Amino acid sequence: MNEELRIALENFLNTFRDSEPVTRYLNAKEMYMSDGRLVALINKYNVEAQLLRDEGAKEERDDALIGEITVRLKDLYDEIMRNENMIAVQNAEQEINMILDGINRGLMSVVRPEDAGGCSGNCSSCSSCH
């Protein structure tokens, strides 16, 4: 990478690091990680999921046990997904992913301009003709 690009990247990274979406994400992630109840629920979910995999891999499966574990997993999942810290981190993560996708699309439009919304010559992929 040449010096001009390195400086531009460093400036971009500093701007991105200080942006509201990144701040929201980092704060949400911190709240998520410090929520003892949420972490315990996720750990319990992971244990139950492993029990389900183990039981499902057995030659002689206990279908009743599989059903019970499945119900417990669904209940745990629902409780986890209702947690305000889980909701906040997922929303913040989605916002960051949208930004990163836009950045990637912008970069790719430089090296592959034919994929940047211009005419590809294939009318089936076009929403309208210019």
Image (cartoon, rainbow, N blue to C red):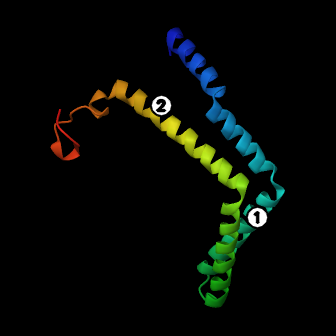
Instruction: Residue at 62% x, 35% y: name it.
Output: 21
Where residue 52 sits: x, y (%)?
Answer: 65, 76
Instruction: Residue at 52% x, 35% y: name it.
Output: 99
Q: Quadrant of the C terminus?
A: top left
Residue carrying label 1: 41
- Residue 73: which quarter of the image? bottom right
In the drawing, does residue 77 fall left or right of residue 44? left
Instruction: Residue at 47% x, 38% y: name it.
Output: 101
In the drawing, does residue 111 fall left or right of residue 86? left
List the single residue furthest toward the top.
Answer: 3
In the image, residue 126 sits, relative to residue 55, either above or below, namely above
Amino acid tagged 2: Ile
- Element under disc 1: helix
Q: Give the crowd class for mark 2: few <14, some 14-19, many >=20 residues within 10 Å.
A: few
Where residue 91 sits: x, y (%)?
Answer: 61, 48
Residue carrying label 2: 103
- Residue 50: which quarter of the image? bottom right
Q: Which mark is residue 95?
A: none
